[in-house]
Amino acid sequence: MELYESVNRNKRNSILLIFVMLALVFAVAWALTYVTRLGTFGLILALLLSGAYAWGGYFYSDKIVLKMSNAKPADKKQYPHYVNAIEGLAIAAGIPMPAAYVIEDDAPNAFATGRDPLHASVAVTTGLLKIMDRYELEGVLAHELSHIKNYDIRFATLVVVLVGAIAIMGDFAMRMLFYGGGRRDSKGGGGLLLILGLALIILAPIFAQLVHLAISRKREFLADASSVQLTRDPSGLSSALAKIGKSTLRVKNATDATASLYISNPLPNKFLSLFSTHPKIEERIAALKKIG
């Protein structure tokens, strides 16, 4: 019961956060039309630019991420258990087998990417393969396949697209204001609306990023819980997370843009949990123990 409640709770929270993000997009769109002289034309232009960005990000983000991470297709002869484990877990999850990749890196980590189960890939580092036993590796892979089965990869892509759209519209509005295209009148309460519009344009990208990070953390808890449905044993993932948590190595090719994809934050993080892409390892292990 704890497992299913954990899955349902995280799904509800994630959907709520995505609605907050959509509301923020519309708020920024309103602010753009109000503070710039271009009005509706400016909105259409900004939406076209954002749409082009979204289209490219949605269809090509997985290829870009794999290229950025220097991930190579996994050779079944060299990594037989890794490839066989993905195949077996994919069958158990009822999804097509994702493409398997390996990243030459001593830091233990893994991620899934793609836009849906038919266009998905899983990548693990050589450091992860070296330190994990069979059950721990299966726990990690079940976590990544859960991201695919739960459409987290599409969800994550959508969130990144919305964050990008907000940033593009905000940047467009600021450029218009800088070059003299802004609204100047303050009659009939227009001054207050102008201040509100400017505040939205300036603060929305920051708030959107915070929402993005919150969604990322919720989806990690969901994938942890869902992985137990595949392996029927939370101890494998718990032990794997404990090993990953002890590592101080940084994934060399990881960036701020790709950090949220990994099973654990691949970058040194000294900020508050509010600014973290992942929940604390200790919190995830404690949640898994409750399920077990």
Image (spheres, rainbow, N blue to C red):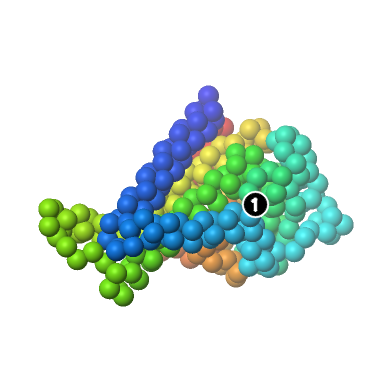
Where is residue 100? Give x, y as percent.
Answer: 75, 54
Secondary structure of the residue carrying numbered label 1? strand
Answer with left or right where residue 23 lies relative to residue 158: left
Which residue sits at x=54%, y=45%? 155
Where is residue 179? Give x, y as percent.
Answer: 31, 75
Which residue sits at x=32%, y=52%? 30
| Quadrant of the drawing holding the C terminus | top right
Q: In this view of the protein, which residue sits in the foreground, 7 or 2?
A: 7
Q: In this view of the protein, which residue sits in the foreground, 77 or 206?
A: 206
Check the image and report above or below for 150 versus 110.
above
Residue type, numbered disc 1: Gly
Res 90 quadrant in image: top right
Q: In this view of the protein, which residue sits in the foreground, 54 or 188?
A: 188
Which residue sits at x=26%, y=67%? 182
Residue 283 visible within the image: no
Q: Which residue is mark 1?
A: 114
User: What is the total number of numbered labels drawn onto the structure image?
Assistant: 1
Which residue sits at x=76%, y=37%? 91
Label 1 crowd (10 A; few <14 / some 14-19 / many >=20): many
